Image (cartoon, helix red, strand yellow):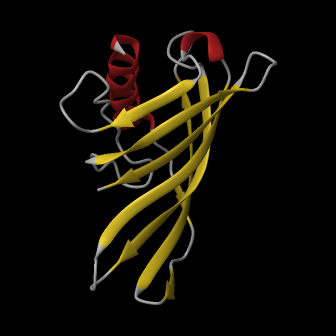
Amino acid sequence: MKLARLAALFLVTVAALLTSANLAAAGENSGASTAHFTATYDNGSSFGGIFTCSGERIVKTAPKAFVKDSATCKISDIATWPAGTYIIGGTGPDGAVWFSDYDGATAVSGTLVVTDNGDGTGTMNIVAYY
């Protein structure tokens, strides 16, 4: 899980420097607003290569308020970010740090699930809460 922590730290730095999120207009639905976002990161030959991401930011007000990102990223180099499930937040050995593609906020919990596409690329599904 050291790789996951190092990779997450690298992505945090890259996200802070290279985020180019394209935002769509937010809509209202049952006390929740949503916004679509896209982002692309070029990590070179490290930690997944090029990430091409799209997702949704959901903000729900009371009762049971939350802020959630749900996103999918295609990564160009599965060899540098192995398939598996990575836990976001916490203090244990799996406690990866994740920053939002939407606004750069730090997630407090969630999961990253990386799947090998069988062609050298991978798909990362992210669910993160802020």
- Looking at the figure, which quarter contains the N terminus? top left
* x, y percent for residue 12: 34, 31
* Image: 40 above or below 129: above
* Image: 42 above or below 58: above
- Looking at the figure, which quarter contains the C terminus? bottom left
Picture quarter containing residue 53? top right
* x, y percent for residue 23: 53, 63
- The residue at the point 34 percent across, 42 percent down is 99
* Image: 18 above or below 8: below
Q: Nearer the viewer, residue 106 or 129?
A: 129
- The residue at the point 54 percent across, 17 percent down is 81
Tell me if I can see residue 107 in this picture.
no
Q: Nearer the viewer, residue 27 or 108?
A: 108
| Residue at the far right in the pictured view | 119
Indicate left or right for 91 with 33 as reference.
left
Picture quarter containing residue 95? top left
Q: Nearer the viewer, residue 101 or 66?
A: 66
- The residue at the point 75 percent across, 15 percent down is 120
Indicate left or right for 60 with 25 as reference.
left
Indicate left or right for 95 with 32 as reference.
left
